[in-house]
Image (cartoon, helix red, strand yellow):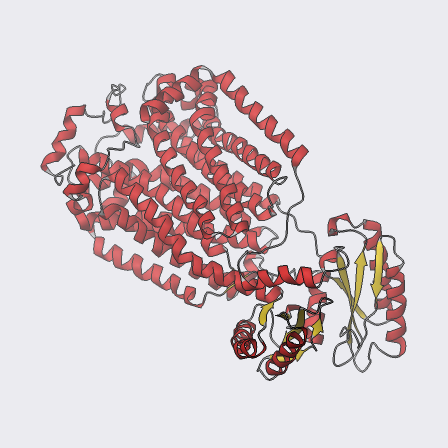
Amino acid sequence: MSTFLYRLGRFAYRRKWPVIGAWLAVLLVAGVAALGLMKPFSSSTSIPGTEAQRTLDVMEKEFPSEDGNVTGKIVFRAPDGQKITAGEPAEAIADMTRDAGQAPGVAAATAPSVETGTVSPDGRTGIAQVTFAAEKADAIPDATKQEIEAAAEKGRGAGLSVELGGDAFAPEVKVLGPMEAVGVLIALGVLVLVFRTLRGAIIPVATALVGVAIGVLSLLAMTSVITMDSTSIILAVMLGLAVGIDYALFIVSRHQTQVREGMDPEESAGLATGTAGGAVVFAGATVVIALAALAVVNIPFLTVMGLGAAATVVVSVLIAVTLLPAVLGLVGTNIATSTVPVLRRSAERAQRRATATGRPGRGQRWASSVARRPWLVLVTCLLGLGIMAAPAADLRLGLGGGVDPHSSAGRAQTLIDEGFGPGYSGTLVVLAQGEDKSAVLSAANDLAAQVNELPGVSSVSPPVPASSGDAALVNVTPSSGPESEATKGLLAEIREARGGIEQRTDTTLNVTGTSAVNIDVADKLSSALPLYCLLVMGLALVLLIVVFRAIAVPLKAALGFLLSLGASLGALVAVFQWGWLSDLLGITQTGPVLSFLPMLLVGILFGLAMDYEVFLVSRMREEYKHGRPPTEAMVRGFGHSSQVVTAAALIMIAIFGSFIFAELQVIKGMGFALAIGVLLDAFVVRMTLVPAVMAVLGHRAWWLPRVLQRWLPEVDIEGERLTQLHTAPSGSEEPHLPRQHASVGADHAPSGE
């Protein structure tokens, strides 16, 4: 593969304009396709096969809604000592409801009443239902919303508390904001420090943006044939930017070093693509495997999310090995120099330090200090990560998140919770089905009576039969909120209590409702997580064993990932569930962690962790194969790779961290979890724990059973053989050893290396 990539890199460098033109044409086609085919995003979350989802599908047939128009709520609260059903509050509410019903684009407006259950038990709070002619909230004219707001203002003038809520009045949330641009600027700053040239820093950002644009526009075009929500697009942007910049960084860094050492730029572009590009392809493949494996758990919205992000990563890899060398052809030898005086002087000082004899770099000094006290470092890292992981024991999953409590919709929900109880908005619905109409109604009545005696039940409605008589439903209002453990326990008790009634009446009783759907989704995701972890880690372990031709190194990589994953989940629970640092991070609402976030975190973080493992340990293996003792090979290999891996991790943290300040709670959680995960995995596990473990293992780190030595192929992802075919440029501190010197390692390496 390295030879193919070498030729591809040289071809792109020589034919820069056709290659750049081809990618611009792809970008144009993707843009036109997105404009012509893009459909609105979906906001529904469902998992086929769960009881709650199957029951909902039956309910749509047995109890069809009159229309699919969007609805909203006007929530009223009377002052202390008054009720909304009498006197001035009742008159004001009647006037407001009439005005709302007369607004253009409103199909109907229904005032609160005791009979419909829209007046609270204390009589102070009521809910008016507003049905619009539009089928989606974004299709409601602004003039219509303004007239309803004007009607609400009249009620406030009469002394009532009035708030607008429901789907129609949900606050508009910006999917992307200025903070994401700040992350890109921070990444650009890191690249300037690495390359010490502005043009060298701009190239990775520019090519990454092209890759993200192509990937996202292609996904937008795909909304015409698949259901997709905005979170899938955000994940693609987040991951595409991070890996696109990082992959370009690895290749440009090697290219710049070679050009500064005197290598011909075209030859250098090919060699950098064949060596660092090979590691980029492998790293990208690992991330793609982890993301594509989300399809195995058979959860539609998660499958779309994973495949969409995986497609963006594939585009980023293709950009890195084709468009990037072409852009390097535009700058030629200028990649090694800078016209900015400060950067030029900084580059000259760095060059002098690099050529100074007997002066190891920061990376080698750090690895040496770790190797001197490996057990102390091991114990310290394990204790620190273990303490951080402790909150993960309290991890609770859900699909809520609600709305901003400071918005009118959030205040409306607060009024409803206080007036009707927190379970009013999370009603559980029991559906009875059977062939005998009288048995169906009897079963529904029996279950209603039995459920009414359960603790945690606020109210149970009388059974409502379907027009066919084959089904009846019972609404159960919990006394606890939709995301609480008490509601989850109540759902389990209802499902446990139905068995005897089903046998006696020969009917089927199933439970659904928004709360039940969310609980079933969380349970299925929780049960699928171990299988997903085993699948992803198993495939990655096989790949790493093939790459490193060793057992201990891949096992160490996987176990280190589990440590960083546990610590990341612990931080996620502490911040988003317990509320630590919530004010600082702008988190307005705490509660259960989004149920699909741990699975996404596993997929993305594992892929990125293996990236850093490959870039760090492959250089250690190269030094070891050249005959150096294990500890020295670790130190020297770490010194070669640590600077670029540090920069790559900082870029990842900047990109992911910028999404913490997004408005959507799901995006905040994803950004925080990935940023803290990369921080811990890169700097604690890969840059600290890995050198300590390698120092402790010594030769054992590279042991491979004889049976595997015969069967495993030789995979040269770093392009070592390709490098050996090239004469080292003049002035380099340490030229690559000729091919025959690789056999020196036979005296130190275990058999088979």
**x and y percent of residue 743 in the render?**
13, 30
Q: Quadrant of the N terminus?
A: top left
* Foreground of the two, 112 or 610: 112
Seen as rendered, the residue at the extreme bottom is: 453
Number of marks in picture: 0
Horizontal side of 724 relative to 133 (left or right) equals: left
Horizontal side of 536 relative to 188 (left or right) equals: left
Seen as rendered, the residue at the extreme left is: 747
Seen as rendered, the residue at the extreme front is: 436
**Residue 590 appears in the figure:** no
Q: Quadrant of the C terminus?
A: top left
**x and y percent of residue 677 in the render?**
42, 52
**x and y percent of residue 446 in the render?**
62, 81
Up-down relation of residue 244 to residue 500 (above or below): above
**Residue 114 appears in the figure:** yes
Up-down relation of residue 474 to residue 745 (above or below): below
**x and y percent of residue 587 in the render?**
57, 59
Horizontal side of 426 relative to 274 (left or right) equals: right
**Which residue corresponds to the image point at 31% horizontal and 50% vertical from the top-left?**
558
Horizontal side of 374 relative to 270 (left or right) equals: left
* Foreground of the two, 631 or 563: 563
Residue 401 quadrant: bottom right
* Foreground of the two, 338 or 554: 554
